Amino acid sequence: MTNRNKIYEGKAKIVWATEKPEEVAQQFKDDATAFDGKKKGQIARKGVRNARISAILFKLLEENGIATQLVDQIFDDTLLCKKLVMYPVEVVVRNYAAGSICKRLGFEEGARLKEPLLEFFLKDDSLGDPMVAEAHIRELDLVGREELAEVKRLVLEINAILSKFFADRGVMLVDFKLEFGKDGDGNIVLGDEISPDTCRFWDASTKKKLDKDRFRRDLGDVEEAYAEMLKRVEK
Ligand code: UDP
């Protein structure tokens, strides 16, 4: 893989073209950013750990009937993926209050929500990825009406599968972010990644944070948290 076939470089991943037009390779980086890129750093071995964690979780979801982008893990830090046309919307699912919902609405951190709470964010760096309501999604034609209903159904199913998987490993799935796209056949497919970069994981007994919040808030033990989550996921 040379610079010639680099399609896109983001904050945490590089997307490479492959010999097959319908597949891309996603390389996970050690680079970490927070607060809209204002905080930058590196987390040693994050790339390989997140690639492995994401591969295991996507495989788990596939086994449970959820279509994902994952084809295969081809290097320690690289996943071969089906190429998708991504929706310009991120979906956040919250089981417990943490992060921006506490700042926005005054929830106490760790409060159990009555039911999984879905939020949508427009993927637009120049606008600062604002939260959007379903009315905005319809007005801006970001996701079709029926497609949005399907995305919501998938998100709740994924949350149920992952919440159980992590509960069995002594981890609370506090919240996480998902991205979807469409494949060449028009199927709605889960894309991007599921990792400690995109989820909040708390140890169920100690409530210790085992995710990117350790980097965001300078809590220390950052690499150890990623290593611990890989260990739990591999169990
Ligand atoms: N998240 C993400 N990418 C983003 C924004 C959020 O993966 O661009 C994840 C984040 O790791 C957390 C969940 O989505 O698990 C909810 O994030 P929140 O809205 O609380 O924002 P934060 O305060 O983390 O920026």
Image (spheres, grey):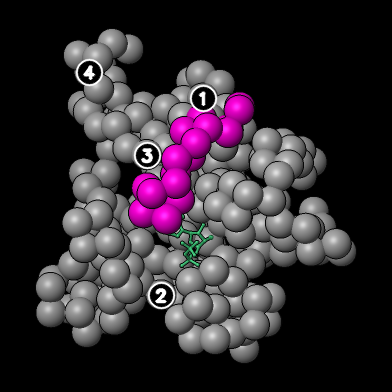
Q: How far apart are marks 3 and 2 (CA)?
A: 22 Å
- Which residue carries the number 4 mark? 5
- Under mark 3, the amino acid is Lys
Question: Does residue 171 appear left or right of residue 65 in this picture?
Answer: right
Q: Do the residues labelled 4 and 3 touch (CB within 8 Å)?
A: no
Mark closer to the chain start, 2 or 4? 4
The image shows residue 152 at horizontal and vertical percentages of: 40, 73
Dot 3: few (<14), some (14–19), or many (≥20) neighbours within 10 Å? some
Mark closer to the chain start, 1 or 2? 1
- Under mark 4, the amino acid is Asn
Q: What element carries label 1?
A: loop
Q: In this view, does 70 lie above or below 185?
A: above
Magenta stretch, residue numbers: 30-46
Dot 1: few (<14), some (14–19), or many (≥20) neighbours within 10 Å? many
- Which residue carries the number 2 mark? 119
Q: Is mark 4 on a helix, strand or loop?
A: helix
Mark closer to the chain start, 4 or 3? 4
- Under mark 1, the amino acid is Asp
Label 2 CB less than 8 angstroms from ligand 1: yes
Mark closer to the observer (3, 1): 3
Residue 170 visible in this rendered orientation of the protein: yes
- Which residue carries the number 1 mark? 77
Question: Does residue 207 appear left or right of residue 216 in this picture?
Answer: right
